[in-house]
Image: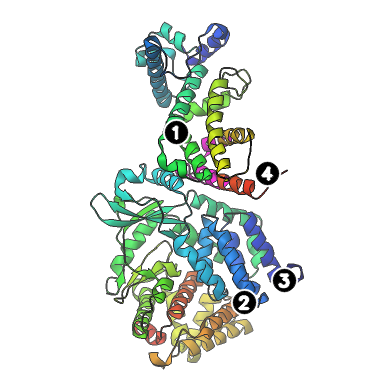
Amino acid sequence: MVKTRKGPVQRAARLVKLGASLAGSYLAYRVQRPFLGQERAQSRRSALRLKQAKKVRQELQGLRGPIMKLGQALSMQTHFLGSELVEELSALQMQAPPMHPTLMRAQFKSALGKYPEDVFRSFDTEAFAAASLGQVHRAVTKDGEDVAVKIQYPAMRETIESDFQALRAAGFAARVTGHLRESVIREVERGILEETDYVQEAKNIEHFRQALAPLDFVRVPTVHQALSSDRVLTMSRVSGLPLQAFVKTGPDQQLRDKLGAELSRLFFFQLYRVGALHADPHPGNYLFNHDGTISLVDFGCVKHLKPEVVRCYSQFWSREWTSDAKLYREIVRVVFGAKMSPEAPHVRRCLTELKRFYDQYHPLDKTPSELDLGNPKFMDALTELAKVLMKNKFLSPEFVFLSRTESGMCNLLHILKARVATTQIARQWMPPL
Amino acid sequence: MSILILMKKGATNRPGRKKPAADGTHGGKREQNKERTRQRILRAALQLFKEKGLGRTTTKEISKKSGIAEGTLFNYFKTKEDLALYFFQKETEDLIKWFRAEARLQKAPLPEKLFAIIHRQLEYIEPYEDFIGAVFYRSLQPTSTLSPLSFESQELRLKYLRFIREILAEAEEKKEIPRLGGLGAYAVGLFYLGIVTHWLHDGSRGKGKTLALLDHSLNFATKILNTGGWEW
């Protein structure tokens, strides 16, 4: 079957093999990801897909480090993958233990100079969650406070750097992806490398805790600086269940709608008031409580936004560009670059598709009860949109993490089956033009 | 006098020298005293190596720091290599004693056990990286006491190999890996040397690259053994 494939799919298949042979290569995945949707389209039979999904999960569970991250990122991409695979992969998010206790202790000591039992009153050697590029352990400080200790797998930064170097040297980025610009790859690399620095993440947590204080439904942990370093991060423990587990407890529609609205408010508040985004929206990073609060964890990937990007992006929601030629030209300049003609057919096509998608799923004038983001067609439409945009080179580096966060939010709203008037919430915070 | 001159002298004197006891805890009071002296000299020498480097440390300084007369030093260690050999004997004794006392590790899967053992060895030599680096390089010379072919180091090597073979035999018993026979322990020994070489060159934060390499290779090797890659 593989032999008959042509073009990008064939290349993707080869890349998958490459990724497997590089065992530990992170970028191979990142690059092949855009093709996974087509891979999926090839296999129609659900039973077969389920079997494949199980196999993928089992394979991933046996691996560590970057591949682990790969699993998490994959599970977030509902719109590129079958739901069977997503279900299987979500098992990875909170369970797989990538480091055995001996390695975990060795890494802890390498980062903090002491073993965990020397600095904590008690320390659980079994990880309770997989985190970005590492794992999380429960512990109690000498003062008796419950904390979560995130420990990074050794040499992540070096591994990722050499992945990118190898790919650059081989010219893979250009050859394999074609439509991915070097600036986009650079932006992805910047984001991923930043995630390996827990000192930066500690700063992000402090920043967001203060910035999000006006939203009374959001909980952000506090950092224990003395028990943290660049590869170990000790935080107060926050309550809540990851979305899949929360949904299984059977929350009623009212609570679903409330949480859905809160997720949207959280997104737009960051966009318009904070100017920076918590940009790793995989479901394990949002913990849901029955009292209607949401705990936000894992601030490894934060994207600071340029005002012109925010202004331009707002247009997708407000759609004022349809009657304002100046706004339209600005969007084209920000997304496609100053040299691009606003009248180029592929530019037109992108914006028409965008408008159609937002009109249908984020309409301007409907009440929440008229909307249902649990609609199975919603994620398919998002996938279609992503494909069209990708094909037509709609990929500014500034938008990589912004659109990732938006599709992550949509994914959460979808799984939550929430009815939310997203556009009205967007407009509530949107500054006047 | 430089320690390097000591080495040359030691090389000519070798046939007449006394072999240090492999295990200082046994024997009479006389032997116990000797063992204590050996440890005192080693501690002083290692401290000086750490501060000044291997080449710059003189016998005089070791004598002064350990409080043992210069002439007496020769009765214990003829050469720096003898000192190194003694260091590794202590290291291996410490390793075996430590491992036997770690109750949780006895039940751990094989890759974790081997990881723990090699990591413990690296931790032991970590404060003396310069010294180990110099010794490691020298041990590749065929005339060295530390060379894998030397008679002087046989006993130490066998002790280590037996220890590893026991651990592998337990794993074979539990069907964690297929039967490897005597080769398994040699493979682990060689693997350890490879890891030390990597460790000496590892400039990553906290030598994280070595930790990752150790973890990946042990898991990989176990997987290969179990998927029949061994049957050739």
Q: Is residue B36 above or below residue A191?
A: above
Tag on residue B230?
Answer: 4
Element carrying mark 2: helix
Disc 1 sits on a residue from what chain? B
Kindly identify the amino acid type of the residue bearing the numbered disc 1. Answer: Glu
Marks 1, 3 in one chain: no
Tell me if residue A182 can be seen: no
Q: CA distance from mark 2 to mark 4?
A: 37 Å
Q: Inspect the magenta stretch and tell me whether residue A418 lies in it.
A: no
Q: CA distance from mark 1 to mark 3?
A: 52 Å
Reading the chain from its start, which is encountered first: label 2 or label 3? 3
Element carrying mark 4: loop
**Which is more foreground, mark 1 or mark 4?**
4
Tag on residue B126?
Answer: 1
Residue A44 position within the rendered picture, expressed as x and y whole percent measured from the top left: 65, 78
Element carrying mark 1: helix
The 10 Å Cα crowd at callout 3, few under 14, some 14 to 19, many 20 or more, is few
Residue A314 position within the rendered picture, expressed as x and y whole percent measured from the top left: 43, 81
Q: CA distance from mark 3 to mark 4?
A: 38 Å
